[in-house]
Image (cartoon, rainbow, N blue to C red):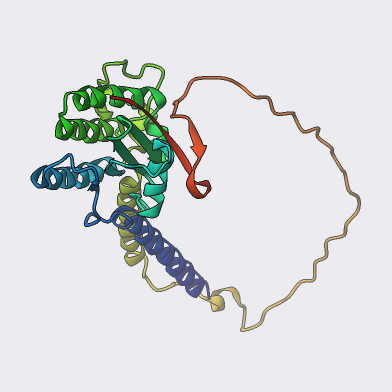
Amino acid sequence: MVEKSVSFRFKSISRLLVCLIAAVFFCIFCGFDSSQQKVYDNAGILTDSQEAKLQKKCVEYAEKAKTDIIILTAENTTKKSSMQYTEDFFMAHDFGYDKLHGDGVIMLIDMHNREIWISTSGNAIKYLSDKRIDNIVTSVTGKLSNGNYYDACTVFIEKTADYMTYLPSSSDAGGNGSTSTVHDAASLTEKLFYAFPVKLAIAAAVAIVITFILRSQNKAAMAVDNHRYMREHKYIIREQRDRFIRSTRVRHEKASSSSGGGGGHRGGSSHHGSGGHSFGGGGGKF
């Protein structure tokens, strides 16, 4: 009976671990559609060759940053603000790296109003702080003013992906838009939680292997059974009762919680946009 109980528990734990690994790998490898169009040159400011290169670069850097990266150009925003037009476009095309309307960054180049707008969704709101968006906008508008549209889009992709590798802090980069990698700039906590799903999957796989090894080494037959505890095939049941005598009640006053300040990561400001979805972002003229 004991052996069956242990076996049942082992099977339950094994199934749980398998489900956990499946869920982790689903989150890692599913959700991002690399074949989806990422560059929408509706204003016609890019050549076909440039558009194809930017499409490839968007997918490549999105997989590194675990964030969907989209470029949109427009000649007419249908009387919408740049912010609203960009957010509506993001929602209508179901962008998002991890899920629909998930982690993503989209940049609009509005040729009619000579304005750019960058909208962030999901984790990108936390990673692309207001200061970081200002840095990207400054770098991009400088090239747009000179008509270097392809270079401006390239700068947007590369700086966005670079910023997505570590969280902003009080010592974040200044107005020059310079960044560094997660290994140089991140704190210990950021390094521990960087690529956490991958680390969790590896840990779960190792746990399953160890569990199977221990299980295989513990298959020896039981040397002791119920007959060892019986005399002449007889047993005695002794009656025992627990009598409730008294009770004691102790009351503890619950301490009031107090809010405390402190440091931490500072993400970008956000608001509720199209369909109540949360967006961050910023922009500027060129």
Number of labelled discs? Answer: 0
Q: Is residue 11 left or right of residue 225?
A: left
Q: Is residue 187 left or right of residue 276?
A: left
Position of residue 181 relative to residue 211, above or below, is above
Q: Position of residue 121 (x, y in %)?
A: 41, 42
Q: Say which quarter of the image contains residue 162.
A: top left
Q: Quadrant of the C terminus?
A: top left
Q: Residue furthest bottom?
A: 233
Residue toward you, 92 or 249: 92
Q: Is residue 251 left or right of residue 46?
A: right
Q: Position of residue 201 (x, y in %)?
A: 33, 52
- Give me the residue at 33% from left, 31% from top: 113
Q: Say which quarter of the image contains residue 237.
A: bottom right
- Give me the residue at 20% from left, 30% from top: 152
Position of residue 104 relative to residue 220, above or below, is above
Q: Position of residue 88 (x, y in %)?
A: 41, 47
Residue toward you, 197 or 40: 40
- Give me the residue at 89% from left, 48% from top: 247
Residue toward you, 192 or 234: 192
Position of residue 220 relative to residue 281, above or below, is below
Residue 100: tell me if it is visible. Answer: no
Q: Residue furthest left?
A: 49
Q: Position of residue 241 (x, y in %)?
A: 83, 65
Residue toward you, 61 or 260: 61
Residue 69: tell me if it is visible. Answer: yes
